[in-house]
């Protein structure tokens, strides 16, 4: 996919999905019996690979704000981390779409690990309770649920990828039936 897609279409696709996923993640976060995908982390990353450019930067900033706001912080580290991870996604998309599955899975897995570790460091630096804990204890507590969180985020990435494929589906001109292949063009970043 390229940035030449109609901006109105991109706004509609990203806006509807972003609002739905933010609501879904906030509702699913109330029940922690099973691991749920971090949609507000995965969505901007995949948007960076799907349509390289400034879209994921804005989506990462908005997703981080919603995460911080839901945690009771107006402006916090979530905005900064999500924005920087979205910029990393743009860097991976620099050479086009040739290895979307490999780049997407590595980006989601790496971002999940980095996000978990950075947020645990921020939580250790600014404890909200009166619990004194060591740095190693904070990192160990963050790494225990990481394998299930990785699987949940990869499953969420598959759902978002399927949504993007359907939303940006383009029929071939001049033919009556729909084409099952998506036209992909490389975008050169400056």
Image (tube, grey):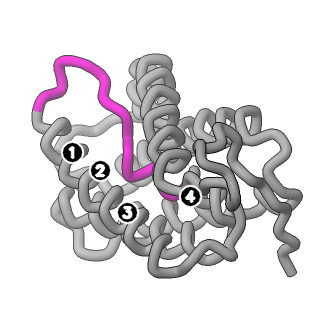
State the residue position of label 4.
47
Residue 2 sits in quarter: bottom right
Q: Which mark is residue 63?
A: 3
Q: Answer yes or no: do the residues labelled 2 and 4 have beta carbons within 8 Å?
A: no
Camera sees residue 72: yes
Q: Which residues are magenta?
A: 31-45
Please give left or right for residue 112 compared with residue 2 in the image.
Answer: left
Is the residue marked by circle 2 packed among few (<14), some (14-19), or many (20+) residues within 10 Å? some
- Left or right: residue 167 compared with residue 95: left
The answer to whether the residues at label 4 and label 3 have Cβ atoms under 8 Å apart is no
Contact check, label 2 and label 1, Cβ < 8 Å: yes
Residue in the picture at 76% in, 33% down: 102
Q: Secondary structure at mark 2?
A: helix
* Front tag of 2 and 3: 2
**Which residue bears the numbered disc 2?**
21
- Residue under label 1, please give it: 24
């Amino acid at each position: 996919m390229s940035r030449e897609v109609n901006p109105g279409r991109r706004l509609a696709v990203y806006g509807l999905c972003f609002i739905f996923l933010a609501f879904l993640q906030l509702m699913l976060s109330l029940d922690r019996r099973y691991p749920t995908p971090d949609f507000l982390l995965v969505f901007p990353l995949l948007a960076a690979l799907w349509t390289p450019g400034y879209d994921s930067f804005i989506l990462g900033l908005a997703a981080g704000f919603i995460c911080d706001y839901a945690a009771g912080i107006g402006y916090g580290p979530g905005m900064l981390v999500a924005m920087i991870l979205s910029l990393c996604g743009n860097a991976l998309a620099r050479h086009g779409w040739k290895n979307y599955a490999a780049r997407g899975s590595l980006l989601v897995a790496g971002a999940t690990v980095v996000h978990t570790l950075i947020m645990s460091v921020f939580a250790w630096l600014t404890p909200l309770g009166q619990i004194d804990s060591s740095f190693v204890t904070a990192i160990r507590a963050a790494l225990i649920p990481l394998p299930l969180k990785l699987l949940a985020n990869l499953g969420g990435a598959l759902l978002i990828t399927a949504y993007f494929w359907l939303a940006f589906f383009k029929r071939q001109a001049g033919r009556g039936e729909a084409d099952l292949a998506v036209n992909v063009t490389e975008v050169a970043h400056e």
